[in-house]
């Protein structure tokens, strides 16, 4: 995208989509915070850091920007990664969808 922006005379950092401002309900953290593991071995942690929700992956920790009642983006270098939270009947996220993948919440470890 950076090369296309450069060719069009746009700022290199210009993102493809400008998302409208969206605010999640106050209980969103308790509904989505946790560990999610893909079948391929990737692990993602949704965390609350200084009042903001973030995603931690193998490449770092990134602030989530809400884009809808069940969706967010996070930025890595000049890329925007979209994700959607999949909720069960109780309202708790059981997985995150990212690209064509569904990444389930990790099972809680027995103590």
Image (spheres, rainbow, N blue to C red):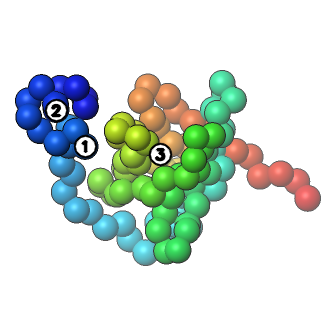
Q: Horizontal and vertical percent for residue 86? A: 47, 45
Mark 1 vs 3: CB contact within 8 A: no
Residue under label 3 = 86
Q: Are marks 1 and 2 in contact (CB under 8 Å)?
A: yes
The reply to whether residue 52 is in sight is: yes
In this view, the residue farthest toward the left is 8
N-term-proximal mark, 1 vs 2:
2
Quarter of the image with the C terminus is bottom right
Where the N terminus falls, by quadrant? top left
Mark number, residue 87? none
User: Does dot 2 land on a helix, a strand or a loop?
Assistant: helix
Q: Nearer the viewer, mark 2 or mark 3?
A: 2
Q: Is residue 17 visible?
A: no
Q: CA distance from mark 1 to mark 2?
A: 8 Å
Q: Residue at x 34, y 39 (%)?
A: 78
Q: In the picture shown, does residue 34 fall above or below 51?
A: above
Query: Viewed as shown, does residue 50 lie left or right of 68?
Result: right
Q: Report the disc number at residue 5.
A: 2
Crowding near the residue tagged with mark 1, few <14, some 14–19, many ≥20 C-alpha atoms within 10 Å = few
Classify residue 36 by image quadrant: top right
Tell me which corner region of the image, top left, top right, bottom left or bottom right, holds residue 92: bottom right
Q: Front-most of 102 and 48? A: 48
Q: Residues within 10 Å of mark 3 (few under 14, many from 20)?
A: some
Check disc 1 and report the residue beneath it: 13
């Amino acid at each position: 995208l950076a090369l296309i922006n450069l060719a069009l005379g746009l700022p290199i950092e210009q993102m493809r989509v400008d998302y409208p401002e969206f605010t999640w309900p106050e209980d969103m953290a308790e509904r989505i915070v946790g560990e999610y593991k893909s079948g391929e071995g990737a692990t993602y942690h949704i965390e609350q850091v200084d009042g903001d929700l973030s995603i931690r992956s193998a490449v770092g920790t990134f602030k989530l920007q809400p884009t809808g009642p069940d969706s967010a983006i996070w930025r890595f270098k000049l890329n925007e990664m979209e994700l959607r939270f999949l909720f069960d009947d109780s309202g708790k996220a059981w997985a995150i969808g990212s690209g064509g993948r569904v990444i389930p919440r990790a099972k809680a470890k027995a103590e």
